[in-house]
């Protein structure tokens, strides 16, 4: 019963978050929406930010689990941007709130996971390709991860235009040349 109540609280919060900004949602409204009293909310969560962080963390984990293998840069972009696009109103409300850092923290984790998973599949030799083209794996991963993260942040700041997804794919493709990561 306790897990059902917790899920009902989360679902009510997400419903309300899709309707209005985070700052305009109260515990009283969440409790009323899911048919519980306020004490039941506080039994599960200290406050709304704690609950929101758990939701973002769970969604990030679910996204990572949905992509156990990533074989292309396009998949990296699709994984991250599709999550944002499908949840655009709720994410937009979180992104433009004082709790933005929670979203950014888990977005970076998702970017790190997708880029690392892709890189390890695409470059089982660590990205060296040829002997004269040795690349520092951590440097390349960091660069591509930051590029993907930055593209996501730009996407959010520009109002999430669909064409940004294609632009991000093109930008990331430019970092790879004929199966060898550019490192110089």
Image (tube, helix red, strand yellow):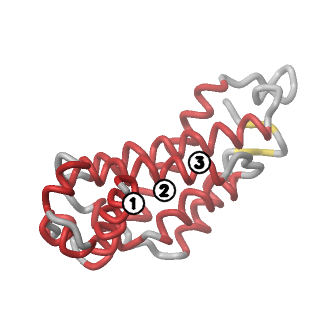
Which SS class for mark 2? helix
The answer to whether mark 2 and mark 3 are in CB contact below 8 A is no
The answer to whether mark 1 and mark 3 are in CB contact below 8 A is no
For the point 54% across and 34% down, the residue is 142
- The answer to whether 110 is drawn above or below residue 183 in the figure is below
- The answer to whether 9 is drawn above or below residue 69 in the figure is below
Ranked by sequence position, the earlier of labels 1 and 3 is 1
For the point 25% across and 62% down, the residue is 96
Ranked by sequence position, the earlier of labels 2 and 3 is 3
From the image, state whether disc 1 or disc 3 is nearer to you: 1
- The answer to whether 78 is drawn above or below residue 122 in the figure is below
Residue that lies at the very extreme toward the front in this rendered image: 1
Residue that lies at the very extreme toward the bottom in this rendered image: 19
Q: Position of residue 140 (x, y in %)?
A: 62, 32
**Residue of label 2:** 151
Which corner quadrant holds the N terminus? Answer: bottom left
- Residue 181 vs residue 90: left or right? right
Which corner quadrant holds the C terminus? Answer: top right
| Circle 1 residues within 10 Å: few <14, some 14–19, many ≥20 | few
Q: Position of residue 67 (x, y in %)?
A: 67, 51
- Disc 2/disc 3 C-alpha distance (Å): 19 Å
Ranked by sequence position, the earlier of labels 2 and 1 is 1
Q: Nearer the viewer, residue 142 or 53?
A: 53
For the point 59% across and 48% down, the residue is 64
- Residue 68 vs residue 128: left or right? left
From the image, state whether disc 2 or disc 3 is nearer to you: 3
Which SS class for mark 3? helix
**Residue of label 1:** 4
**Residue of label 3:** 64
For the point 84% across and 45% down, the residue is 178
């Amino acid at each position: 019963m306790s897990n059902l109540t917790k899920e009902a609280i989360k679902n009510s919060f997400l419903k309300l978050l899709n309707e209005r900004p985070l700052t305009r949602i109260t515990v009283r409204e969440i409790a009323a929406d899911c048919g519980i009293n306020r004490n039941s909310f506080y039994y599960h969560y200290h406050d709304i930010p704690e609950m929101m962080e758990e939701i973002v963390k769970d969604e990030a984990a679910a996204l990572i689990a949905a992509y156990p293998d990533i074989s292309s840069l396009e998949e990296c972009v699709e994984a991250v941007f599709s999550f944002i696009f499908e949840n655009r109103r709720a994410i937009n409300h979180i992104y433009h709130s004082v709790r933005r850092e929670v979203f950014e923290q888990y977005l970076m984790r998702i970017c790190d996971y997708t880029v690392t998973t892709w890189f390890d599949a695409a470059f089982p030799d660590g990205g060296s390709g040829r002997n004269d083209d040795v690349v520092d794996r951590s440097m390349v991963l960091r660069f591509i991860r930051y590029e993907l993260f930055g593209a996501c942040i730009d996407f959010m700041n520009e109002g999430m235009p669909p064409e940004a997804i294609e632009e991000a794919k093109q930008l990331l493709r430019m970092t790879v040349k004929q199966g060898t990561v550019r490192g110089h």
